[in-house]
Amino acid sequence: MGSIPLFSPDDVNASVESAKYAFSKWSEKSARERSIVLFKAASLVREEQDRLSKLLTSEQGKILPEAKNEIQGFANVLEFYASIAGAVFGTALPKSDYGYSFTKKEPIGVCGAIIPWNMPVLIMAWKIGPAIASGCSIVLKPSQKTPLTTIEIAGIMKRAGLPDGVLEIVTGRGDIVGGAIAKSREISALSFTGSASTGAEVERLSCGTRKRLTLELGGSDPMVVCSDADIDLAVSGAVSGRFYNCGQTCTAVKRLFVFEDIYDSFLSKLKERTEKISVGNGLLKGVMMGPLNSREGLLSIEKLADEEVGKGADIISGGKIISGGDFDKGNFFEPTIIANPDFQSRLLREEVFGPILPVVPVNSLDTAIEYSNNTEFGLGASVWTKNLKDAYAFSEGVDAGIVWVNKHLKIPPEVPFGGEKSSGTGRENGISALEHYMREKTVIISP
């Protein structure tokens, strides 16, 4: 499909210097001037949606409708930050013996971003949107697995009027390029999305550089279905929430807890819906789920399924690698439902990236909350019920940065997003992210 340069630490430092120079000019632009560029970039991305979507599917594997949705999501995020670029205000303080005081918000400086392969375009927008809108410049490293669409969009940003250096793309190995970004003392804020283990290394390398960190480190999201839930709606939510992007999404439904009195009915309908999912090349019409992104990921999912069977769990649907013919050209795995998994299994405790969903019966909301919290992660969670009291009780009791009621997975750009525990620190999206890229200055004027 193409080739990309492998940056060295010196190359990264040169990009940081370019971004530093660009920041001195870009930060002087008014919020309105910055917004015009972002709105123009969003418009151009929408115009090229078909081409960009096909490129994204080709390099990442997701089906074309999901790729189009992600490209649209990129434009949505840019438009949101263009609309609020000037919405962060300081405060005026009462007069006192010290004089008249006020605070102001200023762009923090050169920023860094490290993005993953699973949702590269949308997560790119989550990072560059608030940074550029606030007046910062940003050095962004895409995953080695999915750099092409990111690079294409960077070119579109330039065509929209973004000055050279405001967005620098650096490509190459994570330990080398990502490590250089983390260690740079010229970068004032860094936003990282990836695994918990890599996030810990980014945090270690950043120690002593005094940069602000936002770490989005994945999750093991629970979905709880109560007795009074709309079963058809919940089944649909479980299927789309788990098998979207072949299950390779940080906020995917990864653990399903269903009340005992509806468990059999729910499981039957879930099996029926899951077995209707057509798997294949994401560029083909009618395909509902594409391949996993890597052979490593494919074998990991196969191993998990085999582990559960060995412990006595029941494979309700799927459970195997799909092979033969064109399937041998990709990393295809059957959409899989597993009932009665071992409570201490990795499937119920770790972040699992792939199309495999464990289903567990529970006897109460308290038990569902207890099971939901039985993991080191705390990113997202959902409860499906018509009872507002139960919905509120779940939202209070579950350890998660975002809680959905009768929905899962959707994250509009207006709302803050992030996790608790090992799912990370800081927030993306919303006005919270805009403030992450700004510093507060106090001014005191003597009487």
Image (cartoon, helix red, strand yellow):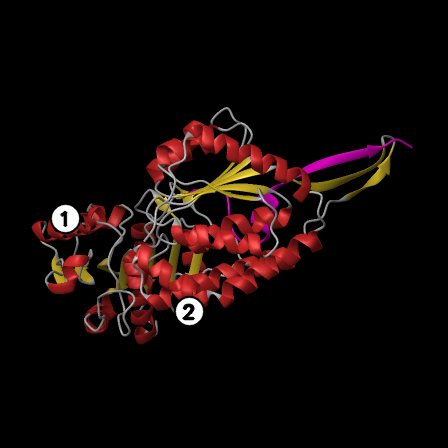
Dot label at residue 303: 1
Q: Write down the residue under mark 2.
A: 387
**Which amino acid type is shown beneath numbered disc 2?**
Asn
Residue 101: x and y, percent?
A: 81, 37
Residue 78 lies in quadrant: bottom right
Q: Is residue 173 left or right of residue 215?
A: left
Q: Nearer the viewer, residue 221 or 105?
A: 105
Identify the residue at image location x=50%, y=24%: 208
Find the magenta span and give its range: 424-447
Dot label at residue 265: none
Residue 146: x and y, percent?
A: 35, 50
Residue 263: x and y, percent?
A: 22, 68
User: Compared with residue 324, is residue 146 higher up or lower down, i.e. above or below?
Assistant: above
Q: Residue furthest front?
A: 2
> Is 259 within the magenta?
no
Identify the residue at image location x=22%, y=66%: 280
**Which amino acid type is shown beneath numbered disc 1?**
Lys
Q: Residues within 10 Å of mark 2 (few under 14, many from 20)?
A: few
Q: Is residue 6 left or right of residue 130?
A: left
Q: Residues within 10 Å of mark 1 (few under 14, many from 20)?
A: few
Q: Nearer the viewer, residue 89 or 374?
A: 89
Element carrying mark 2: loop
Element carrying mark 1: helix
- In what quadrant of the picture does the C terminus appear? top right
> Is 445 within the magenta?
yes
